């Protein structure tokens, strides 16, 4: 789900699951409120990983996985907040239960490396964030690579 609105946008009790690149993506958005959202990473990743067969398309603000050095890094983002402001999130559950349809990564909680990305954004307020089996819950970047 790509949201570029200048708001207000209200998302209540929604889910976005199994998309190749990302589930929720706020790009240049403003005045966004969401509550009780839920995501799941595609079960087949990282084989093939999120960069295959799609190549990043800047027209749609696709994530670029070219800087990833591990297979777990090349998994779909649950939530991306890029160049956005005034984002209010209350209750989000982002799940990564599989690697190549296997659940051997679940006990170690390392099915994927990163799951939520915040980049170049301000006034981002996230409450009640829950993730399962990601190494890094939230990755903060000051600029995109």
Image: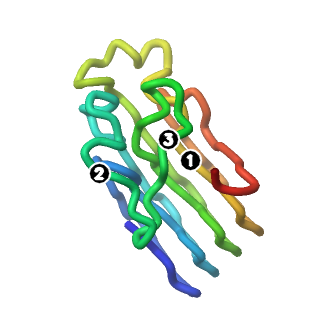
Q: Is residue 115 above or below residue 55?
A: above
Q: Is residue 71 above or below residue 43?
A: above
Q: CA distance from mark 3 to mark 1?
A: 17 Å
- Residue at the image point whose x is 47% and y is 54% from the top: 63
Residue labelled with disc 1: 116
Please name whichever residue, 68 or 41, is drawn nearer the observer in this view of the structure.
68
Quarter holding residue 47 = top left
Q: Earlier in the sequence, mark 3 or mark 2?
A: 2
Quarter holding residue 67 = top right
Residue 45: percent from left, percent from top: 31, 32
- Residue at the image point whose x is 46% and y is 44% from the top: 94
Q: CA distance from mark 3 to mark 2?
A: 12 Å
Q: Are marks 1 and 2 in contact (CB under 8 Å)?
A: no
Residue 18: percent from left, percent from top: 28, 47
Question: Could you say whether the residue bearing mark 3 is in a helix, strand or loop?
Answer: loop
Q: Earlier in the sequence, mark 3 or mark 1?
A: 3
| Neighbourhood count class around disc 3 (C-alpha, 10 Å): few under 14, some 14–19, many 20 upward | few
Q: Earlier in the sequence, mark 1 or mark 2?
A: 2
Residue labelled with disc 2: 54
| Neighbourhood count class around disc 2 (C-alpha, 10 Å): few under 14, some 14–19, many 20 upward | few
Residue labelled with disc 3: 66
Of circles 1 and 2, which is in front?
2
| Neighbourhood count class around disc 1 (C-alpha, 10 Å): few under 14, some 14–19, many 20 upward | many
Question: Could you say whether the residue bearing mark 1 is in a helix, strand or loop?
Answer: strand
Question: Could you say whether the residue bearing mark 2 is in a helix, strand or loop?
Answer: loop
């Amino acid at each position: 789900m790509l949201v570029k609105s200048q708001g207000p946008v209200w998302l209540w009790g929604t889910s976005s699951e199994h998309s190749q690149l990302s589930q929720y993506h706020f790009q240049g958005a403003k005045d966004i409120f969401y509550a009780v959202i839920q995501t799941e990473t595609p079960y087949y990743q990282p084989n093939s990983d999120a960069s295959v067969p799609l190549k990043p398309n800047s027209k749609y603000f696709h994530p670029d996985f070219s800087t990833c050095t591990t297979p777990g890094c090349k998994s779909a983002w649950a939530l991306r907040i890029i160049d956005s402001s005034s984002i209010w999130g209350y209750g989000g559950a982002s799940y990564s239960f599989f690697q190549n349809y296997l659940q051997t990564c679940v006990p170690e909680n390392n099915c994927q490396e990163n799951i939520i990305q915040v980049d170049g954004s301000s006034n981002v307020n996230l409450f009640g964030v829950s993730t399962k089996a990601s190494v890094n819950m939230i990755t903060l970047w000051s600029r995109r690579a």
